[in-house]
Amino acid sequence: MRFLVTGGAGFLGSHLCERLIGDGHDVVCYDTYLTGNEKNLENLRNEPRFDAYERDVTKFVEFDGELDWVMHLASPASPVHYLEHPIHTLKVGAHGTYNCLGLAKAKGASFFMASTSEIYGDPLVHPQPEGYWGNVNTIGPRGVYDEAKRYAEAMTFAYHREWQIPIRLVRIFNTYGPRMSRQDGRAVPNFISQALKAQPITVYGDGMQTRSLCYVTDLIEGFIRLLDYKGAARPFNLGNPHEVTILDIAKRVKDLIGSESEIVFEELPVDDPKQRCPDITSVKENLGWEPAVGLDDGLAMTVDWCRANWA
Ligand code: NAD
Ligand code: UDP
């Protein structure tokens, strides 16, 4: 099959492109390299079934030839990045999703939407099942990302209902692994970068807020299984339900690296969710998927990659 992956030069997108090529498909990547990097696609450079183009999906999206799938991952994903690019983040979730759905419709292709656990906001239900509608501050700084993705979900379902476009929708919970940029700003790459340089490890707030970290290969396996899903259109949570505090993650990274860094506490960003953990009952039942890589193993593989690849 032929796939278009938007945001394919990013952290998740590059792993997805590699997996699809490995599975024997043709893959085209569209990316602006705003937060991604051509270097992430180095392994695919000489692959005849792979092409990458600099394209902004907030503008009209054209594609020459047939397509079976449009997989829409383009969007800043780290809070640091979407706070730096608030309007672009809204545009890529809204106009970008609309354009990519239009392309899928024109090509008779299926559409895959990379949504996020952020649509649950600072959740009042814990762990979060797909039926929970969320608790988002629309006008807060994170609203640009959360609301863009909520709009993207609504638009994806509207295209499905009005035009019968086959859709898949995943709500991705915090995922980490090789190819995260040193400048990404999310907790795992920040802590690793700081620990490697023996700089203070910056924990925001008291570090008692929780997240549930999924290793990247587990997540991509979930994406691939979802492509074969035959049931009624619905959102699926994808993430690792092993919930830990941010302070615990900072300590694990420090110990793993054997770093001299001290852990320091800084101001908690506005609207930072206090807790986050996916209820993965649906995805287990429907796709037989659950994560296989534990946190310590995943962090060790990530640290090895960062040591070898970050200048
Ligand atoms: P990333 O920043 O590494 O990748 C995003 C990619 O999108 C980058 O390569 C960027 O250059 C590209 N991009 C941005 N605007 C674009 C545009 N207008 N046109 C084309 N390309 C554009 O982030 P990631 O972690 O790989 O996230 C990928 C997707 O998964 C995002 O949609 C994000 O919202 C979603 N997601 C990720 C996580 C996670 O934990 N990694 C969690 C929830 C959701
Ligand atoms: N965080 C932190 N120190 C950092 C970066 C992040 O304590 O250097 C915290 C952040 O406030 C949040 C959690 O770690 O509570 C996860 O943040 P991240 O940016 O990785 O993703 P989020 O889940 O907030 O989108």
Image (cartoon, rainbow, N blue to C red):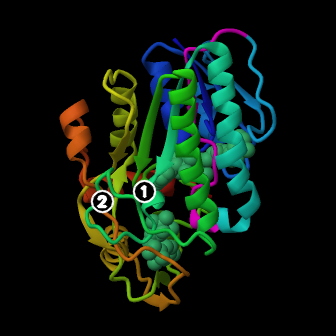
**Above-or-below relation of 157 to 296:** above
Q: Secondary structure at mark 2?
A: loop
Q: Which residue shows up at 50% across the image and 68% down it?
A: 136
Q: Give the mark count.
A: 2
Marks 2 and 1: in contact by CB < 8 Å? yes
Which quarter of the rendering shows the C terminus? bottom right
> Mark 2 = which residue?
128
Pointer 1 residue: 117
The residue lying toward the viewer, choosing from 176 and 234, is: 234
Report the magenta residues as a range. Answer: 65-81
Residue 62: horizontal and vertical position, in percent? 77, 23
Q: In this view of the protein, can residue 179 be seen by the observer?
A: no
Q: CA separation, marks 1 and 2?
A: 9 Å
Residue type beneath disc 1: Ser
Q: Residue at x 63, y 43 (%)?
A: 74
Residue beneath the point at 24% across and 41% down: 282
Residue 247 magenta-highlighted: no
